Amino acid sequence: GENVEQHPSTLSVQEGDSAVIKCTYSDSASNYFPWYKQELGKGPQLIIDIRSNVGEKKDQRIAVTLNKTAKHFSLHITETQPEDSAVYFCAAKVGTDKLIFGTGTRLQVFP
Amino acid sequence: NAGVTQTPKFRVLKTGQSMTLLCAQDMNHEYMYWYRQDPGMGLRLIHYSVGEGTTAKGEVPDGYNVSRLKKQNFLLGLESAAPSQTSVYFCASSPFIRTSGETQYFGPGTRLLVL
């Protein structure tokens, strides 16, 4: 079946450094790729998304890139801050109704 | 706007007991989803609904049933709880995808422990 692989599972960075999380998807028909942030004790919240007709999208300190040929997409966070510490999930749309999520990356930003 | 709410927040069950988790949304969304979150496994889709009166199976539907009698509510039932169903359960809703976007809005979760 369809799946999404996400790496790394944990990531520790110093405040101010950049963080990169990578995902690979299996369904070549997927055309929508969101990223969610989950803070401790809360539900996931959308932070950025990208569609297959776009190669890159930025929103202030976060950006997402998509390589459709390789079926890879990545989340880039620049100038990390302690409040960026959370679990991040990538996802890929499957069919018309569903998202398949990656297994998550726990990001820790040390002051 | 309360968004997506889930009831209860936490529950302990004994093996074989049954329970119903309630999800409610006040955003008039067409689509609703139930996920379970387990360590190292991300979010896995249990069941979902594309409109009032409809339901469909997700990745891990066994042992669960759902109902969507009202547009704003999506119920997840465990008929005979098993320890393997110990998890955190999240409900999400989304507007009609083709016209209003695809963002899923998540509730705060229900932590379930089955002994």
Image (cartoon, coloured by chain):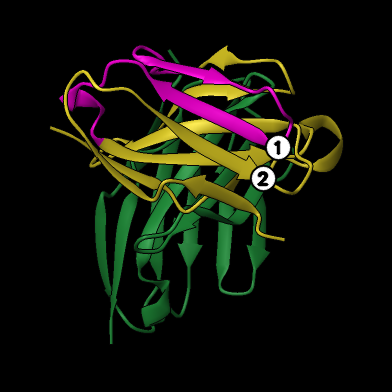
Chain colours: A green, B yellow
Q: Which chain contains the residue that carries disc 2?
A: B
From mark 2 to mark 1, how far is it between C-alphas?
Answer: 5 Å
Please state which of residues B91 and A30 is positioned toward the viewer in this rendering.
B91
Which residue, given by chain and number where applicable, does mark 2 sit on? B25
Please provide the residue range marked out in magenta: B58-86
Which amino acid type is shown beneath numbered disc 1? Answer: Gln
Which residue, given by chain and number where applicable, does mark 1 sit on? B72
In the picture as drawn, the residue positioned furthest to the bottom comes out as: A111
Decide if residue A96 is in sight here: yes
Which residue appears at 34% of the width and 63% of the height? Answer: A40
Q: Is residue B94 above or below residue A107?
A: above
In the picture as drawn, the residue positioned furthest to the right comes out as: B99
Q: Which chain contains the residue that carries disc 1?
A: B
| Badge count | 2
**Residue B78 picture location, percent across and down:** 36, 21
**Residue A74 picture location, percent across and down:** 48, 50
Left/right placement of residue B67 relative to residue B52 reads left
